Amino acid sequence: MTFLRVRELVSGYDRSTVLGGVDLDLDAGAVLGLLGRNGVGKSTLVMTLMGLVPVTSGSVLLDGEELAGRRPDAIARAGVALVPQGRRVWATLTVAEHLALAGRGRRGGWTVDAVYELLPRLAERRRQYAGQLSGGEQQMLAVARALVTNPKLVLLDEPSDGLAPSVVDQLVGVIGRMRAEGAGILLVEQDLHLAFAVSDEIAVMEKGRIVHRVDTPAFRRDPDTAHRLLGVA
Ligand SMILES: Nc1ncnc2c1ncn2[C@@H]1O[C@H](COP(=O)(O)OP(=O)(O)O)[C@@H](O)[C@H]1O
Ligand SMILES: [Mg+2]
């Protein structure tokens, strides 16, 4: 059985269909980097997988369980966690309050203490309000908030956006740990350096569909295709 099996997923907003039939497979313990120009529907895809954008039609099977049409809280309980674009931490809650809320009722190795050990800067800041943290610290908090749910499937939407290189390196480490523990990871990224550093395979989206998918070394050997699909060298 495929760990994550998405078929003909269609979704969008009031007046517009954005996802025009997405097919996507992902194995447990694998990282898929999802690239694509601005506005092609990458965020809409991860938000649809999380139940935050309603499914019009299609199927999302996780470990054989149908998630399409479920509410975000049910999808979270099924083991999916989203690190949203733009972090979306709650400015008036402290670091500790974020992690206590997110980890409530969840079982697994990623306790709040284990996450503090992995990310000591967050431990130092545990009594600070999220709104007082730097951008990099907020991003780490968004990642930590996902980790304490002990997710099976992690959806990361441009986590490196605006981060200093040292924080990006830390992200590489955290993604590697999640993967080693058997989580499946879908990583939306603009930073090709990060995407290449952690992804087993690269998929490219165009106009609401996955149009290209190869292993990362093959993608790197083919700059013409990258240029055609992404407009980068
Ligand atoms: N909340 C929304 N309401 C209406 N349209 C939206 C909304 N969010 C995104 N869109 C539109 O959906 C399309 C895909 O956007 P998005 O999924 O954010 O793309 P990406 O993440 O690849 O940049 C764009 O045309 C965008 O304008
Ligand atoms: Mg986006």
Image (spheres, rainbow, N blue to C red):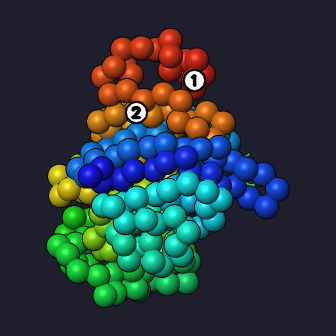
Residue at figure coordinates x 29%, y 82% from the top left: 106
Q: Residue at x 40, y 33 (%)?
A: 202
Q: Residues within 10 Å of mark 1 (few under 14, many from 20)?
A: some
Report, in whole angstroms, how far the alpha carbon at label 2 lies from the one at label 1.
12 Å
> What percent of the width, then of the height, locates residue 172?
30, 46
Whichever of callouts 2 and 1 sits on the residue coming sooner in the sequence is: 2
Query: Up-down: is 24 above or below 121?
Result: above
Quarter of the view holding residue 66: bottom left
**Relative to 114, does residue 220 appear above or below in the rendering?**
above
- In the image: residue 142, left or right of residue 115: right
Task: Answer whether labels 2 and 1 touch (C-beta < 8 Å).
Answer: no
Say which mark, if any, is on residue 229: 1
Q: Secondary structure at mark 1?
A: helix
Q: Nearer the viewer, residue 81 or 212?
A: 212
Of residues 16 and 56, the one nearer the viewer is 56
In this rendering, would 96 be left or right of 119?
right
